[in-house]
Image (cartoon, grey):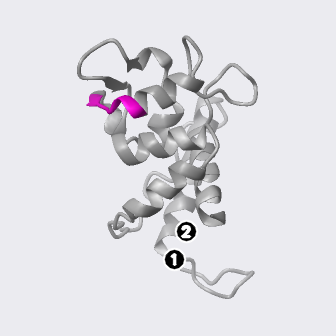
Amino acid sequence: NKPSHRTGQVPGAEARATYLSHLQQFYAWAIREGQLKADPSIRLVRPKLPRRIPRPIREDRLEEAIKTAPDPLRCWFMLAGYAGLRAGEIARLRREDVNDGTEPLTIVVQDGKGGHSRVIPVDAVVVSAVLRIAPVRGWCWLATNGVDHIPPHRVSQRSNAFLHDH
């Protein structure tokens, strides 16, 4: 652990874990491209990170965010707060996964945490909020290229920016 040339401080465990992840991704790319035969980062030890404690939003603040947020943020807050979807699950939601013709109303989360799919019963208010702005089929929220789904980090960034500003 050497001090940073910029700050003079030793990077924390989270920063070291991030740096290691970047290195491993780079070497994986280099191997795929035929630039290397083996991954030199294979023996590096990943720092032990403490479990993060969830920071759920207070109920009154969630309700206020839903009342004041524009779409699609309003939908995202409802999906996260009332259905428990994560940013990646919200980003990859397809219109076909919103089952509005069944009782109970459900949302199918494809490839959720750990690569698992699950079916979530949801309130009609959540379903109607999604259906009001989602296309007839395909990704509910498109990236700027108009073809792919919005990246999960954009869902997180835009949501956090709105919540911090309000």
Residue 139, above or below 137: below
Residue 106 occupies quadrant: top left
**Residue 144: percent from left, percent from top:** 75, 30
- Tell me where residue 123 sits by quadrant: top left
Q: Residue type at mark 2: give it.
A: Ala
Q: Looking at the image, which residue is at 45% across and 51% down?
A: 42
Q: Quadrant of the C terminus?
A: bottom right
According to the image, label 1 marks what residue? 12
Which stretch is magenta? 119-125
Q: Nearer the viewer, residue 68 or 26?
A: 68
Q: How many marks?
A: 2
Distance between mark 2 and mark 1 Cα atoms = 5 Å
- SS class, disc 2: helix
The image position of residue 72, as x and y in percent, is 60, 37
Residue at 60% across, 52% down: 68
Which residue is drawn at the image coordinates 59% and 25% (left, top)?
Answer: 133
The residue at 31%/32% (across/down) is 122
How many other residues sit within 10 Å of disc 2, few (<14), some (14-19) or many (≥20)?
A: few
User: Is the residue 4 above or below the residue 16 in the image?
Assistant: below
